Image (cartoon, rainbow, N blue to C red):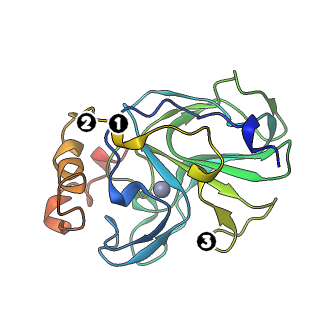
Protein backbone atom coordinates (compact mmCIF):
# COMPACT_ATOMS: atom_id res chain seq x y z
CA UNK A 1 0.00 0.00 0.00
CA UNK A 2 1.18 3.47 -0.83
CA UNK A 3 -1.53 5.27 1.06
CA UNK A 4 0.96 7.31 3.04
CA UNK A 5 1.90 8.98 -0.22
CA UNK A 6 -1.47 10.66 -0.55
CA UNK A 7 -2.14 14.24 0.37
CA UNK A 8 -5.31 16.30 0.66
CA UNK A 9 -6.38 17.94 -2.64
CA UNK A 10 -7.44 21.08 -0.79
CA UNK A 11 -7.14 21.96 2.86
CA UNK A 12 -10.45 21.26 4.63
CA UNK A 13 -11.55 24.11 6.85
CA UNK A 14 -15.33 24.10 7.09
CA UNK A 15 -17.42 21.97 9.44
CA UNK A 16 -18.17 18.53 8.02
CA UNK A 17 -21.81 17.54 7.50
CA UNK A 18 -23.12 13.99 7.56
CA UNK A 19 -24.05 14.59 3.93
CA UNK A 20 -20.36 15.04 3.09
CA UNK A 21 -19.32 11.61 4.27
CA UNK A 22 -18.69 8.43 2.31
CA UNK A 23 -21.43 5.79 2.58
CA UNK A 24 -25.22 5.97 2.73
CA UNK A 25 -26.85 9.38 2.82
CA UNK A 26 -30.25 9.49 4.49
CA UNK A 27 -31.43 12.42 2.36
CA UNK A 28 -29.62 13.49 -0.79
CA UNK A 29 -29.84 17.21 -1.47
CA UNK A 30 -30.62 16.85 -5.16
CA UNK A 31 -32.81 13.75 -5.05
CA UNK A 32 -34.29 14.12 -1.53
CA UNK A 33 -34.07 10.45 -0.69
CA UNK A 34 -31.60 7.89 0.58
CA UNK A 35 -28.68 7.30 -1.74
CA UNK A 36 -25.12 6.03 -1.61
CA UNK A 37 -22.24 8.51 -1.71
CA UNK A 38 -19.07 7.08 -3.19
CA UNK A 39 -16.77 9.93 -2.22
CA UNK A 40 -16.02 12.53 0.42
CA UNK A 41 -17.15 16.13 -0.01
CA UNK A 42 -14.91 18.98 1.10
CA UNK A 43 -16.85 22.24 1.38
CA UNK A 44 -14.70 24.97 -0.14
CA UNK A 45 -14.74 28.58 -1.21
CA UNK A 46 -15.40 28.88 -4.92
CA UNK A 47 -12.07 29.20 -6.71
CA UNK A 48 -9.95 27.15 -4.29
CA UNK A 49 -7.01 25.50 -6.09
CA UNK A 50 -7.24 21.70 -6.35
CA UNK A 51 -4.16 19.45 -6.34
CA UNK A 52 -3.92 15.76 -7.21
CA UNK A 53 -3.73 13.53 -4.12
CA UNK A 54 -0.92 11.63 -5.86
CA UNK A 55 1.03 11.96 -9.08
CA UNK A 56 -0.57 10.37 -12.11
CA UNK A 57 -1.97 10.76 -15.59
CA UNK A 58 -5.13 12.67 -16.52
CA UNK A 59 -7.73 10.38 -18.10
CA UNK A 60 -10.66 12.79 -18.44
CA UNK A 61 -11.31 16.50 -18.03
CA UNK A 62 -14.85 17.36 -19.08
CA UNK A 63 -18.33 18.40 -18.05
CA UNK A 64 -20.24 15.35 -16.83
CA UNK A 65 -23.95 16.03 -16.43
CA UNK A 66 -25.00 12.41 -16.36
CA UNK A 67 -28.54 12.58 -15.11
CA UNK A 68 -29.88 9.89 -12.85
CA UNK A 69 -33.42 10.65 -11.89
CA UNK A 70 -35.02 13.26 -14.04
CA UNK A 71 -32.98 16.37 -13.40
CA UNK A 72 -31.67 18.20 -16.39
CA UNK A 73 -28.01 17.68 -17.16
CA UNK A 74 -26.83 20.95 -15.68
CA UNK A 75 -28.31 20.00 -12.33
CA UNK A 76 -26.83 16.56 -11.91
CA UNK A 77 -23.70 14.49 -12.26
CA UNK A 78 -20.12 15.38 -11.40
CA UNK A 79 -20.28 18.68 -13.27
CA UNK A 80 -16.85 19.79 -14.41
CA UNK A 81 -14.67 16.87 -13.41
CA UNK A 82 -11.13 15.61 -13.74
CA UNK A 83 -10.32 11.91 -13.55
CA UNK A 84 -6.72 10.93 -12.89
CA UNK A 85 -5.07 7.51 -12.95
CA UNK A 86 -2.82 7.57 -9.90
CA UNK A 87 0.66 6.14 -10.20
CA UNK A 88 -0.51 3.48 -7.70
CA UNK A 89 -3.21 2.26 -10.14
CA UNK A 90 -6.26 3.82 -8.49
CA UNK A 91 -8.53 6.17 -10.42
CA UNK A 92 -9.51 9.39 -8.66
CA UNK A 93 -12.41 11.70 -9.55
CA UNK A 94 -12.37 15.40 -8.67
CA UNK A 95 -15.92 16.67 -9.16
CA UNK A 96 -18.05 19.85 -9.20
CA UNK A 97 -15.16 22.05 -10.31
CA UNK A 98 -15.69 25.57 -11.56
CA UNK A 99 -12.88 25.12 -14.08
CA UNK A 100 -10.21 22.57 -14.90
CA UNK A 101 -6.73 23.32 -16.20
CA UNK A 102 -5.61 19.92 -17.49
CA UNK A 103 -6.38 17.65 -20.42
CA UNK A 104 -6.30 13.89 -21.02
CA UNK A 105 -2.73 12.59 -21.24
CA UNK A 106 -1.22 15.25 -18.99
CA UNK A 107 1.16 13.98 -16.34
CA UNK A 108 0.47 15.67 -13.03
CA UNK A 109 2.22 15.90 -9.70
CA UNK A 110 0.88 16.85 -6.30
CA UNK A 111 2.10 20.42 -6.56
CA UNK A 112 0.20 21.02 -9.81
CA UNK A 113 -3.17 22.81 -9.85
CA UNK A 114 -5.65 20.71 -11.86
CA UNK A 115 -8.60 23.05 -11.39
CA UNK A 116 -10.52 25.25 -9.01
CA UNK A 117 -13.51 24.39 -6.85
CA UNK A 118 -17.06 25.33 -7.73
CA UNK A 119 -20.57 23.93 -7.55
CA UNK A 120 -21.15 22.55 -11.06
CA UNK A 121 -23.38 19.54 -11.73
CA UNK A 122 -25.31 17.94 -8.90
CA UNK A 123 -23.94 20.25 -6.24
CA UNK A 124 -25.90 22.66 -4.03
CA UNK A 125 -23.09 23.87 -1.78
CA UNK A 126 -19.68 24.65 -3.31
CA UNK A 127 -17.38 21.72 -2.61
CA UNK A 128 -14.92 19.25 -4.04
CA UNK A 129 -16.26 15.70 -4.50
CA UNK A 130 -13.25 13.43 -4.04
CA UNK A 131 -13.80 9.85 -5.17
CA UNK A 132 -11.11 7.18 -4.99
CA UNK A 133 -11.77 4.03 -6.99
CA UNK A 134 -10.08 0.80 -5.96
CA UNK A 135 -8.60 0.42 -9.43
CA UNK A 136 -8.72 1.97 -12.89
CA UNK A 137 -12.43 1.54 -13.49
CA UNK A 138 -15.26 3.67 -14.86
CA UNK A 139 -17.60 2.10 -12.32
CA UNK A 140 -18.72 4.16 -9.38
CA UNK A 141 -20.60 3.12 -6.25
CA UNK A 142 -19.55 1.75 -2.89
CA UNK A 143 -18.37 -1.58 -4.34
CA UNK A 144 -15.78 0.11 -6.55
CA UNK A 145 -14.54 2.88 -4.27
CA UNK A 146 -12.85 3.33 -0.93
CA UNK A 147 -13.50 5.86 1.78
CA UNK A 148 -11.04 8.68 1.12
CA UNK A 149 -10.68 9.19 4.88
CA UNK A 150 -9.13 5.73 5.14
CA UNK A 151 -6.17 6.66 2.97
CA UNK A 152 -5.65 10.42 3.25
CA UNK A 153 -3.39 11.82 5.97
CA UNK A 154 -5.31 11.82 9.25
CA UNK A 155 -6.87 15.06 10.37
CA UNK A 156 -9.37 15.58 13.16
CA UNK A 157 -12.54 16.53 11.32
CA UNK A 158 -14.22 17.37 14.63
CA UNK A 159 -11.83 20.27 14.97
CA UNK A 160 -12.95 21.87 11.73
CA UNK A 161 -15.28 24.59 12.93
CA UNK A 162 -15.29 27.36 10.38
CA UNK A 163 -18.72 28.48 9.17
CA UNK A 164 -19.45 28.62 5.45
CA UNK A 165 -21.16 31.96 4.82
CA UNK A 166 -21.53 32.39 1.06
CA UNK A 167 -25.20 32.82 0.18
CA UNK A 168 -27.36 31.47 -1.32
CA UNK A 169 -25.56 28.24 -0.49
CA UNK A 170 -24.93 28.84 3.21
CA UNK A 171 -28.57 28.49 4.28
CA UNK A 172 -28.64 24.88 3.14
CA UNK A 173 -25.15 24.28 4.53
CA UNK A 174 -26.25 25.44 7.99
CA UNK A 175 -29.09 22.91 7.97
CA UNK A 176 -26.71 20.14 6.96
CA UNK A 177 -24.29 20.84 9.83
CA UNK A 178 -27.08 21.29 12.38
CA UNK A 179 -28.23 18.69 14.90
CA UNK A 180 -30.82 17.56 12.34
CA UNK A 181 -28.52 17.07 9.36
CA UNK A 182 -31.07 15.32 7.15
CA UNK A 183 -33.93 17.68 7.88
CA UNK A 184 -33.96 19.65 4.65
CA UNK A 185 -36.37 19.66 1.72
CA UNK A 186 -36.56 20.96 -1.79
CA UNK A 187 -37.81 24.22 -0.26
CA UNK A 188 -34.37 24.72 1.25
CA UNK A 189 -32.80 24.44 -2.21
CA UNK A 190 -34.86 27.09 -3.91
CA UNK A 191 -32.23 27.71 -6.55
CA UNK A 192 -32.04 24.12 -7.77
CA UNK A 193 -34.16 24.87 -10.80
CA UNK A 194 -32.13 27.91 -11.77
CA UNK A 195 -28.97 27.58 -13.82
CA UNK A 196 -27.98 30.98 -12.47
CA UNK A 197 -26.67 29.43 -9.25
CA UNK A 198 -25.17 26.16 -10.32
CA UNK A 199 -21.63 27.22 -11.07
ZN1 LIG B 1 -19.74 13.99 -3.22
Disc number at residue 159? Answer: 1
Label 1: state its secondary structure.
Answer: helix
Badge 2: few (under 14), some or many (20 or more) residues near its Cα, within 10 Å?
some
Label 3: which residue? 141
Mark 1 CB near ligand 1 (8 Å cut):
no
Spatial CA span between label 2 and label 1: 15 Å
Label 2: state its secondary structure.
Answer: loop
| Badge nearest the viewer, 2 or 1 | 1
Spatial CA span between label 1 and label 3: 29 Å
**Percent coordinates x, y for residue 163 in the rendering:** 23, 35
**Percent coordinates x, y for residue 85 in the rendering:** 80, 47
Instruction: Tell me the quarter of the picture where residue 141 sits.
Output: bottom right
Badge 1: few (under 14), some or many (20 or more) residues near its Cα, within 10 Å?
few
Rendered view: 97 above or below 38: above
Which of the two discs, 1 and 3, labels the residue nearer the N terminus? 3
* Nearest the eye: 179 or 122: 179
Instruction: Tell me the quarter of the picture where residue 4 sits.
Output: top right
Label 2: which residue? 164
**Percent coordinates x, y for residue 55 in the rendering:** 79, 33
| Residue drawn where x is 31% and y is 72% of the image | 27
Q: Are marks 2 and 3 in contact (CB under 8 Å)?
A: no
41 relative to 146 in the view: left or right: left
| Residue drawn where x is 48% and y is 75% of the image | 68
| Residue drawn where x is 59% and y is 47% of the image | 81
Which of the two discs, 2 and 1, labels the residue nearer the N terminus? 1
Label 3: state its secondary structure.
Answer: loop
Mark 2 CB near ligand 1 (8 Å cut):
no
Badge 3: few (under 14), some or many (20 or more) residues near its Cα, within 10 Å?
some
Which of the two discs, 2 and 3, labels the residue nearer the N terminus? 3
Spatial CA span between label 2 and label 3: 28 Å
Amino acid sequence: MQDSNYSWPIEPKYKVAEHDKYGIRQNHYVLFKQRAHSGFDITADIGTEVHPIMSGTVLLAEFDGTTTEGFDAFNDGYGNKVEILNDDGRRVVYGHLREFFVKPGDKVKKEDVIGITGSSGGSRVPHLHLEIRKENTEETGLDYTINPLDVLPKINLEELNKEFILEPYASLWRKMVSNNPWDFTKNDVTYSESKEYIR
